[in-house]
Image (cartoon, helix red, strand yellow):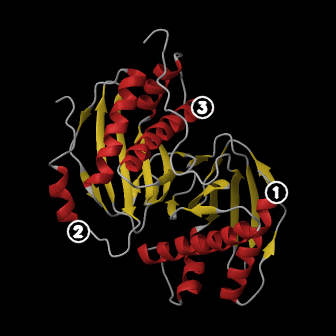
């Protein structure tokens, strides 16, 4: 995980959340994680493809998700229904989009994927050989954690996979 | 959602599984799901960006995953540890990569993201604006389900579910019985 990718995400999150909530957010201590981790109630997952490659996760409790969705969409949600879910996904989308624009300005162009939501605590997510940089953020509504599993893309401006898909010859098939 | 997204993935899955593990594949009934997916024991998630974009997921039970990956690696895997997860992620990666090659041959340029592995049954995966085509592939190792939530990056393009369902009964390859 290249730490130079960190700031665009932290400043994007700060800009968007403090604008929406009209108060500043706090960033806690960073740490690196390897292997897999246990999911919180709600996780937004967005991939990056290009000069920056990998996945970003935004995780939070259900209460924070419902609270954030209510603030962002200007209506009081009682539960994380489909509309509230799309609001949280959009938050992840906007932060990641803003971060990718900052990365592009620094010479790292990438495309971001559409967001998906994983709802359910205690499942295991693995980013395989990508270590994750954990960025804990505190808002007036509660804690939001950004997990960055990013690296410099080895193939730039790639349209199709370069390598021939190998046929594995097993000794005893 | 269009049959043109479906065939490359089904063909890719069939080809890769046949080549890697001598799989006998039988495609079960395809369905469409708009609501959240309820996860299987293990799910590989891969995003696509480009002319065709969205998400593809490969879900299966632990036993099926271990059977397939043990065969590929040529060693007996007893649990879904990081080696097994790395193996199943790579399987999803190879199938998806092969499908995007088919897309590019048809003029649609897309790139796949790195895979994320989700372990844990019964978790909800919401793909929001992307309804999914669900393709169950029965093999001698167990059931592998491919979930395809893709759209074409072209303004003004839309497809109704009815239009899609009638398309799939046509050109999708039938394997096994």
Identify the chain of the residue marked 1, using the numbered disc in the image: A
Residue A87 shown left or right of residue B131 in the figure: right
In space, the residues marked 3 and 1 are separated at their CA atoms by 28 Å
Residue to which mark 3 is pinned: B81
- Above or below, B67 relative to A122: above
Residue B39 visible in this rendered orientation of the protein = no
- Residue B157 in percent (x, y) is at 31, 71
Q: Do labels 3 and 1 share a chain?
A: no
Name the residue at 85% across, 62% down. A29
In which quadrant will I find the N terminus of chain B? bottom left
Front residue (pair A166, B113)? A166
| Residue A37 appears in the rendering | yes
Q: Which chain does tag 3 point to?
A: B
Question: Relative to residue B75, is residue B159 drawn left or right?
Answer: left
Name the residue nearer the viewer: A3 or B121. Answer: A3
Q: Dot 2 corresponds to which residue? A: B160
List the residue tagged with mark 1: A3
Q: What element carries label 3?
A: loop
Q: Quarter holding the C terminus of chain B?
A: top left
B119 on left or right of A136: left
Quadrant of residue B172 in the image?
top left
Residue A50, x across and y down, in percent: 62, 55
Q: How many marks?
A: 3
* Separation of marks 1 and 2 at Cα, in angstroms: 44 Å
Whether residue A135 sits left or right of residue B147 in the image: it is right
- Chain letter for mark 2: B
Q: In the structure shown, which secondary structural element does the residue marked by tag 2 occupy?
A: loop
């Amino acid at each position: 995980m290249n730490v130079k990718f960190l700031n665009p995400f932290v400043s994007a999150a700060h800009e968007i959340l403090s604008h929406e909530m009209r108060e500043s957010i706090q960033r806690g201590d960073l740490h690196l994680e390897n292997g897999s981790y246990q999911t919180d109630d709600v996780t937004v997952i967005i991939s990056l493809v290009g000069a920056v490659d990998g996945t970003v996760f935004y995780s939070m409790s259900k209460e924070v998700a419902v609270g954030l969705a209510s603030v962002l969409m200007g209506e009081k949600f009682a539960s994380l229904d489909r509309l509230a879910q799309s609001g949280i996904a959009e938050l992840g989308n906007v932060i990641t989009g803003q971060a990718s624009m900052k990365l592009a300005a620094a010479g790292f162009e990438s495309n971001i994927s559409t967001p998906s939501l994983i709802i359910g605590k205690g499942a295991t997510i693995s980013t395989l050989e990508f270590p994750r940089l954990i960025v804990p953020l505190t808002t007036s509504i509660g804690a939001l954690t950004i997990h960055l599993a990013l690296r410099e893309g080895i193939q730039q401006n790639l349209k199709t996979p370069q390598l021939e898909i190998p046929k594995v010859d097993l000794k005893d098939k | 959602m269009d049959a043109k997204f479906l065939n490359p993935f089904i063909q890719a899955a069939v080809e890769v599984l046949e080549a890697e593990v001598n799989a006998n594949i039988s495609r079960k009934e395809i369905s469409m799901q708009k609501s959240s997916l309820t996860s299987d024991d293990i799910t590989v998630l891969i995003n696509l960006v480009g002319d065709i974009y969205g998400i593809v997921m490969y879900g299966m039970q632990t036993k099926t995953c271990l059977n397939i990956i043990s065969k590929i690696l040529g060693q007996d895997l007893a649990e879904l540890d990081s080696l097994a997860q790395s193996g199943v992620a790579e399987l999803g990666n190879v199938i998806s990569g092969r499908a995007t090659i088919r897309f590019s041959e048809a003029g649609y340029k897309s790139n796949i993201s790195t895979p994320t592995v989700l372990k844990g049954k019964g978790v909800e995966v919401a793909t929001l604006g992307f309804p999914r085509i669900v393709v169950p592939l029965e093999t001698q190792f167990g059931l592998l389900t491919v979930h395809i939530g893709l759209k074409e990056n072209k303004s003004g393009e839309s497809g109704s579910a009815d239009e899609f369902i009638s398309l799939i009964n046509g050109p999708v390859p039938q394997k096994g019985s």
